[in-house]
Image (cartoon, rainbow, N blue to C red):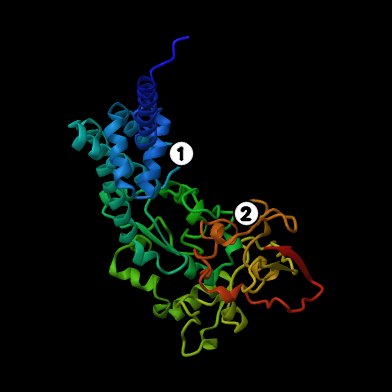
Amino acid sequence: MKKANPATQAHHVSGGAALISILLLLMTSSPCIAAMSITDFLNEFTKNYYQQRFLAQTNLVKENKELVPRAVSKLIEESRTGNKVFEERMYLLNIASAMAYMQRHLHDDNGPLMEVEPIIKRELEQERKKNAELMKWKKEEQFLGNFVMKRHEKELEKANLAPVLYPHWKHRILFECKVCHNAIFRMQRWVNKISQEKIAAGKQCGVCHNGKMAFSAQDEKSCNRCHIAGKPEAARLHDPDLIDHAEIKRVAEKIGAEWHPENLVNGRLPVDRFGLIDWLKMKRDKVFVPLVSLDKNFKERTRDNKILFVSKSDFVDNVLFSHKVHSDWIDCSTCHPAFFVDKLGGNDIRMRDMSRGRFCGHCHGRVSFKFADCKRCHSQAKDAKVDALVRLSAH
């Protein structure tokens, strides 16, 4: 066999090595030159976006021109799927926008940008309007238990009427929560579909506001007693210092409740450190005795036991939950089984869920004291002994 020329052999070897080196270089420095899937491209670009690797993002778009329009469309589609909040949608749209701007700059292709920019503009405008609407009634609803009934706002504007500002706190002086919930109203906002027609038929607010028990909701002269949101007169509904004791006492005597302003210090309602009414102190001081039912044959049921919720945190005290305190106000069916499984240890209660309106958050922070008043609940020391009425539950 004829031997290869050493020089030729060396040349072949070096040539093969050079080709391998070029391929390796292409594979390592520019992994996207080889055909990428749309999924890989999106994953890579999103990772680089999150890590703020601008050069890597640029190279991806530079080397995958044909994938960008589809990728932008997919990001837009993803932003619209599921129940995403504004921040989640904008995160995806901002990635699409960054990609689209690079496509225009690197490839003179304005199509993806023209697709995504109007959507971003629309999202921002909708969020601006939403925030403006929230701020519009913030003052009216800043006092716990107040809420603006604005579902028919457009119709009310045509009738030259302001929305109704409903003050839970003024009604709470006269009635236990169980009087209305759940016999007359479900204890959940926006689900009762309150209307003037139903009220006129003696339902909803019309159960009491019938001209006998309370002023008639059909009396046009009384419209401004409820349709008051946004007006200067509404100040009396979000400032308990403006309470008319004589009027409250007159109404209380009429319906069979009790109001004793003489038991108040300087005639002022007791408040917590957030300036919100301390209802338990009012009860202890015998300032009021609210009506427990509109039915004269009603027999009140209260549950007098306590549950110790053991905090999972090493530095946060336990919670000693009193059923009696709560069942004095509300009926058991309000919470069980809709918000709490009626089984010891059956509820994985977490603060983040409460803040979203679950568990205790169905009332607290809305019509009862705020979560920020931590010690109102977390008042049981870790090593404290508990009495025989207490049952244990993981928290």
Residue that lies at the very extreme toward the bottom in this rendered image: 266
Residue at 27%, 29% (x, y): give it: 65
Q: Nearer the viewer, residue 182 or 71?
A: 71
Few, some or many residues within 10 Å of mark 1 (<14, 14–19, 20+): few
Q: Nearer the viewer, residue 304 or 178?
A: 304
Q: Nearer the viewer, residue 348 or 292?
A: 348
Give the residue number, with chain letter if any, for mark 1: 82
Horizontal arrangement in the rendering, residue 143 relative to residue 381 (left or right): left
Question: How far is the residue under mark 1 from the one under mark 2?
Answer: 24 Å
SS category of the residue bearing label 2: loop
Residue that lies at the very extreme toward the right in this rendered image: 388
Count the numbered circles shown: 2
Q: Quadrant of residue 141?
A: bottom left
Give amino acid for label 2.
Answer: Phe
Give the residue number, with chain letter if any, for mark 2: 339
- Mark 1 or mark 2: which comes first in sequence? 1
Residue 160 in percent (x, y) is at: 26, 54
Residue 59 appears in view: yes
Instruction: Answer above or below: position of 28 versus 175.
Output: above
Q: Quadrant of residue 315?
A: bottom right
Residue 312 in percent (x, y) is at: 66, 65
In the picture, the quarter occupied by the C terminus is bottom right
Residue 249 in percent (x, y) is at: 50, 78
